[in-house]
Amino acid sequence: DVKVTQSSRYLVKRTGEKVFLECVQDMDHENMFWYRQDPGLGLRLIYFSYDVKMKEKGDIPEGYSVSREKKERFSLILESASTNQTSMYLCASSDRGKDEKLFFGSGTQLSVL
Amino acid sequence: GNSVTQMEGPVTLSEEAFLTINCTYTATGYPSLFWYVQYPGEGLQLLLKATKADDKGSNKGFEATYRKETTSFHLEKGSVQVSDSAVYFCALIGGATNKLIFGTGTLLAVQP
């Protein structure tokens, strides 16, 4: 089975801190995605990557950056965390050309105080 | 642009009841339609899909039919179980975008 692993289930950070959310997939997928999930808003795409060292902005990239140095790992970075970034963050991966069949991690609930 | 609208939850049902979760979409062209499910403490997983008009997707007793005339893709199940308690997301891909667009999700709670 495909496994997408997110490094932390819960994370509490202070305003202004630099935050790293890590995601690793074990199925050699080319595509990786970061979403945030908020009540009443559903899932919103932050960034995605179709290849190593490649990244593209999604619908809500402001305040975030990403890094993909290795094919299996996709990191989401909050340069200076703010309270409005408190959210559930979901990482996903998919095979090349199969953007519709995403495999998700179980999420990181980030609280910024 | 493309969008997906789902009925608001939570939906609370007794075991063995009939389930309908409504989903309508707005899209240019001919999108593919999906239902994803998120069980408590887990990531989303693909439940079923339909890629063209009048297609019916089905899995685990759930069904949804792609209705182009009403731009809908309602999720149904004849007899729900407690284990079906989860959040259900309708989604589409295609038309103006090659990325999945998700609805807001509908929480289903099934009571014994």
Image: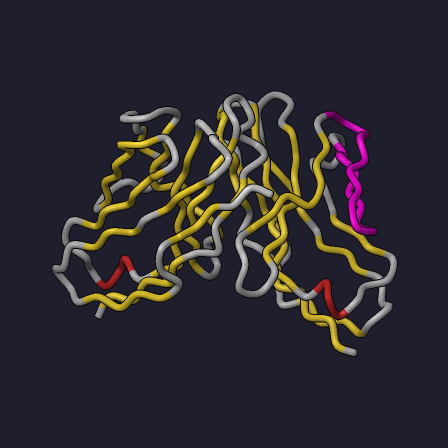
Q: Is residue A56 left or right of residue B59?
A: left
Q: Nearer the viewer, residue B24 or B34?
A: B34
| Quarter of the rendering occupied by the N terminus of chain A | top right
**x and y percentages locating residue A66 in the rendered image:** 26, 39
Q: Is residue B34 above or below residue B12?
A: above
Residue A42, position as x, y percentages in the image: 49, 52
Vertical relation: B55 (above or below) B109: above
User: Where's residue A44, x and y in %?
Assistant: 42, 45
- Segment tinted magenta in the rendering: B52-67
Query: Which of A42/A36 is in front?
Result: A36
Name the residue furthest bottom: B112
Q: Is residue A75 left or right of residue B55?
A: left
Identify the residue at image location x=42%, y=35%.
Answer: A32
Q: Quadrant of the C terminus of chain A?
A: bottom left
The answer to if A79 sits in the magenta stretch is no
Percent of width and height locating residue A4:
47, 46
> Seen from this angle, which residue lies furthest left?
A16
Image: A48 above or below A21: above
Position above or below: A51 against A4? above
Q: Where, by quadrant of the figure, is residue B58 drawn?
A: top right
Q: Quadrant of residue B52?
A: top right
What residue do we see at 67% from left, 47% from top?
B23
Residue drawn at 24 percent across, 51 percent down: A20
Q: Residue at x 87, y 57 (%)?
A: B78
Nearest the eye: B101 or B48: B48
